[in-house]
Amino acid sequence: MKNIPNLFTLLNLFFGCIAVIFTLQNGIAIMYYADGAQYIGIPERMGVASLFIGLAGLVDFLDGLVARIFKATSPMGKQLDSLADVVSFGVAPGMILYQFLRMSFARQENGLDISPIWFLPALLFPCAAAFRLAKFNIDETQRYGFKGVPTPAAGILVASIPLIYWYSTNDTITALLLNKWLLYGVILVMAWLMTSNLPIMALKFSDYTIKGNLPKLILLVVAVLSAIFLKWLAVPVVFIFYIIVSLLSEKK
């Protein structure tokens, strides 16, 4: 029984590895319209990678729940969870950022011949994720609150980028997602948020009163409404709201 939560954690890692495979074997296509305008096509594969990161997030939530149900929490489980998270929410999203930087530069003249060094900043994301997880493992005070943005939240935010690009009918949004400066900014901001000491609320219930969980309930309502009206664009909206609510609730 004590290894059942570890099986969930390994499933998290398994899904993360699949996400990496689909991201690297994405089948990105560069096409041209009749007027010579360039179009970057992302087929289903990178979208599938995003969905596997989402599945990893679901399993990551369940392994902790299962561990509490079976009273099977252990130091090994904690370390294994972090190792899986590095892949699922660090490396896999980092590869998505890497590929989007490639597509961004591919739009430029001679962009296909650009040096890979311009894509390497994407690797700051998995490095920051690993640092964040290591810091979490040695800090016993982060039970009902975090110091810095949790790695799974940051990874899922990045995982939403291909889905927003793929499903969006707004040309402005799709153009922004292929703007290299925006991508560099996302990498730097997310790396800073993960490694910072900003007080971020944990989505765990310390009690079952409305007053004690009001910020979490507000976030839940915003998430549901955003999902209904904004589709995949809801992910960055909810993420930003999550940061704001966390900072405001901490000040109180």
Image (tube, rainbow, N blue to C red):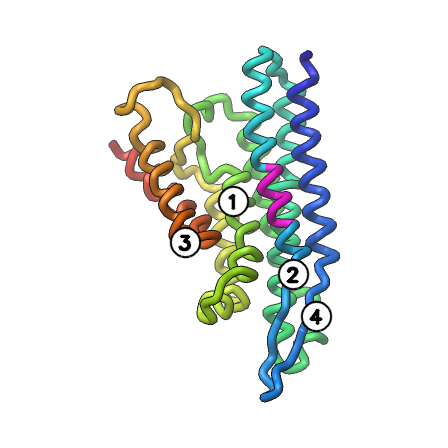
The three-letter amino acid code for the residue at tag 4 is Ser
Q: Which of marks 3 and 2 is nearer the N terminus?
A: 2
Residue at figure coordinates x 65%, y 55% from the top left:
46
- Quadrant (top left/top right/bottom left/bottom right) for the N terminus: top right
Residue at figure coordinates x 61%, y 39% from the top left:
55
Residue at figure coordinates x 42%, y 28% from the top left:
145
Q: Mark 4 points at which residue?
A: 115
> Residue 28's x, y, as percent?
69, 65
Q: Name the residue under label 1.
A: 154
Q: What element carries label 4?
A: loop
Q: Do the residues labelled 1 and 2 touch (CB within 8 Å)?
A: no
Q: Do the residues labelled 1 and 3 touch (CB within 8 Å)?
A: no
Q: Which of marks 2 and 4 is nearer the N terminus?
A: 2
Q: What element carries label 2?
A: helix
Give residue 221's mark: none
Q: How crowded is mark 1: few (under 14 residues within 10 Å), some or many (20 or more)?
A: many
Residue at figure coordinates x 27%, y 34% from the top left:
251
The three-letter amino acid code for the residue at tag 1 is Ala
> Residue 222's x, y, as percent?
35, 42
Q: Tell whether 208 sits left or right of 124.
A: left
Q: Name the residue under label 3.
A: 230
Q: Which of marks 1 and 3 is nearer the N terminus?
A: 1
Q: How crowded is mark 4: few (under 14 residues within 10 Å), some or many (20 or more)?
A: few
Q: Mark 2 points at which residue?
A: 99
The three-letter amino acid code for the residue at tag 3 is Leu
> Residue 132's x, y, as percent?
55, 37
